[in-house]
Amino acid sequence: MENVTMVTPLKQPIVFEIVGFHVPEGQGPLLFFLALLNYLMVVLGNGLVVSGIVCDRALHRPMYVMVCNLAVCDLLGGTTVLIRLMIYFLTGQKRIAYNTAISQAISVHIYGCAVQTILSAMAYDRYLAVCQPLRYHAIMTSSRLVFSCVLPWLVAFLCIGVLFALNVGTPLCGAIINHVYCSNRSILQNACAPTPINNIYGLCMSWCLSTGTFLVIAFSYIKILQACVRQSADSGSRSKAVQTCATHLVIYVFYELSSVVIIMSQRFSTASPNVKKFCSILFVIIPPVINPIIYGLVTKELRLSIIKQLTKKRMLKRTSTVKANN
């Protein structure tokens, strides 16, 4: 049997090696450019959404505050994975320190949890707005809005904090991350012994979180549709129901489809490792780019606010240029 060295990360420094993609010779710069383009779209799109909502006091309403939270979450996910991916494509650097690996893994898992909980909070807010319009402002007070925004992040930090607390002191007999980014599972694959408690907790947490958020979202949208249909049987009511649900449903479906593709890709043994690894990062490539586009195009108030701010900045720049020339 091959000798292995047992290392306890808290006592001895350890450096992981990320397997990553198999990059053909000379293709690194092209892949770096594609990753950079994707990251710029994530930063630009979500940055405009956040700045538009923060700077426009008219948008300081529950729906837009929650959209702002979703945009911040997308920035977290895209930055965590894509920055490291660009470094890998450009320099071929595969080594990553233990603390950095843990930080990336925690950030990725928090992103995955927070997206689901934020989307469920947004769905419930829309349910109150449509089904309880006269009592909406009495129910969604400032304190409850803060609670609705803090709770998704609190749940994510708590769930992931417990998950990684179970890893503390776990001895490792390897230093290979057989993945594109660091995750709890990829790190524990190097453990010297089975980690059943961590595995059971991770499965239960994922199942409870996914099921709970799905039930909240399904309940909210079914009630919205029922309320709109009861108001009138004409096409206008149906159009209102579709318009109310479509934006949030599209974003939720995109995220869930990305998750399903990740799971399904691992079940096909004939798929190439690069295809499987590419599928595993779809949830930080597609949703963070699509979300601001959907909200920017569908939500008229947000779109007009962003255009207004961009126009205002151009006018201020021109004014300052004219004054400098004079």
Image: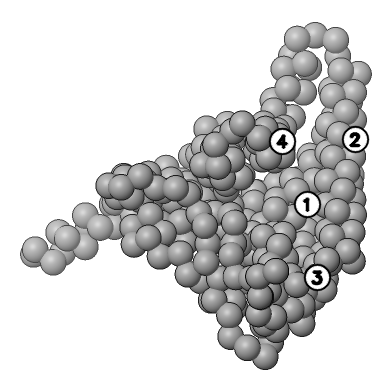
For marks 2 and 4, give the CA distance: 31 Å
Residue at position x 52%, y 66% from top? 17
Q: Quadrant of the C terminus?
A: bottom left
Which residue is disc 4 drawn over?
A: 267
Badge 4 density bin: few <14, some 14–19, many ≥20, Cα 10 Å: few
Q: Amino acid at mark 2?
A: Phe
Which residue is disc 3 drawn over?
A: 193
* SS category of the residue bearing label 3: loop
Q: Amino acid at mark 3?
A: Ala
For marks 1 and 3, give the CA distance: 33 Å
- Sequence-wise, the earlier of marks 2 and 4 is 2
- Sequence-wise, the earlier of marks 3 and 2 is 3
Badge 2 density bin: few <14, some 14–19, many ≥20, Cα 10 Å: some
Q: Are marks 1 and 2 in contact (CB under 8 Å)?
A: no
For marks 1 and 2, give the CA distance: 14 Å
* SS category of the residue bearing label 1: helix
- Sequence-wise, the earlier of marks 3 and 4 is 3
What numbered label is drawn on residue 117?
1
- Front tag of 3 and 2: 3
Which residue is disc 2 drawn over?
A: 219
> Residue 241, position in %: x, y?
77, 23
Residue 171, placed above or below residue 83: below
Q: Is residue 172 left or right of residue 276?
A: right
For marks 1 and 4, give the CA distance: 27 Å
